[in-house]
Image (tube, grey):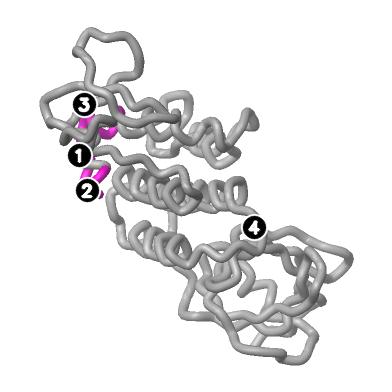
Amino acid sequence: MSGCPATFQGGLSPAFVLHRRDYSNTSLLVDLFVEGRGRFPAVCKGARRPRNPASVLLQPFQPLWLDATGRGEVRTLTRVEPDGPPLPLTGEALLAAFYLNELLIRLLGRYDPHDRLFDAYRGALLDLAGGFDLETLLRRFELDLLRELGYGLILDREMAGDAVIADAWYLVELEEGVRRVESDSDGPLVSGRTLIALARGEPLEDAPRREARALLRRILAPHLGDRPLRSRELYLQWHGSKSRAGLGG
């Protein structure tokens, strides 16, 4: 158990730290994503004192069990325990995981449980640690997030109800849906093959990767606003001026 000074008040919940920063002289302020509770900020008092294990535990990508109490906007952590070792994320996988965290911080409201999304997030981190294809994984998570927030799109059927055809070309209109067009039409065209793969969660390869990435960036843009994603800036810096791509936004 950590040294967060308080009395254990209730049941522990699975959780992850999305972001942390120093608070006051010896404490930490953490942005949490907690099963059954959603995203919210909490203070762990005294976490930065010497020999307090809370500082080590309260890191992104460390599966946790925790409890927090309080009635204000910012809760107080009363207990935190590890739920296994930290996930072994390095390189591109680590940057992709920070991107997932930033999406959740930017798009989720506070104290609004999203348990299906919590499961998707936990599964995505495990897949990243296991070397799963980044492009496919990120697109799946972006679509899961949009659906959970009520902005999901039906990608394998046209607005009129006809099934999307792999060899045809389409426009995805954000407020309406999928519309078939000619291959020389204006606009950000997407192949039916890409739309079908996204709808089914199938692996993305070659051209479908680029099309899917561009499509999800366009869909997410109105929700993310004009402020750049820090995780994407870090990704581009890591790769230099040429991005082999993966992160949306």
Q: Residue at x 22, y 39 (%)?
A: 156
Answer with mark 4 or mark 2, whichever residue precedes in sequence.
4
- Which range of residues does the magenta coloring cover? 199-211
**Labelled pair 2, 1 in contact (Cβ < 8 Å):** yes
**Labelled pair 3, 2 in contact (Cβ < 8 Å):** no
- Residue at mark 4: 19
In x, y percent, where is residue 208?
23, 32
Distance (Cα) linking label 4 and label 2: 32 Å
Give the tally of numbered discs: 4
Point out the frontmost of discs 4 and 1: 1
Distance (Cα) linking label 2 and label 1: 6 Å
Q: Residue at x 52, y 50 (%)?
A: 98
Give, as a three-letter code, the residue at label 3.
Answer: Ser
- Residue at mark 3: 191
Give, as a three-letter code, the residue at label 1.
Answer: Ile
In x, y percent, where is residue 58?
64, 70
Q: Residues within 10 Å of mark 2 (few under 14, many from 20)?
A: few
- Residue at mark 2: 200
What element does badge 1 sit on?
A: helix
In x, y percent, where is residue 200?
22, 48
Distance (Cα) linking label 4 and label 1: 35 Å
Give, as a three-letter code, the residue at label 2.
Answer: Arg
Give, as a three-letter code, the residue at label 4.
Answer: His
Q: Residues within 10 Å of mark 4 (few under 14, many from 20)?
A: some
Camera-side residue of 195 and 231: 195
Distance (Cα) linking label 3 and label 1: 9 Å
- Residue at mark 1: 196
**Labelled pair 4, 3 in contact (Cβ < 8 Å):** no
246 drawn magenta:
no
Distance (Cα) linking label 3 and label 2: 15 Å
Answer with mark 3 or mark 1, whichever residue precedes in sequence.
3
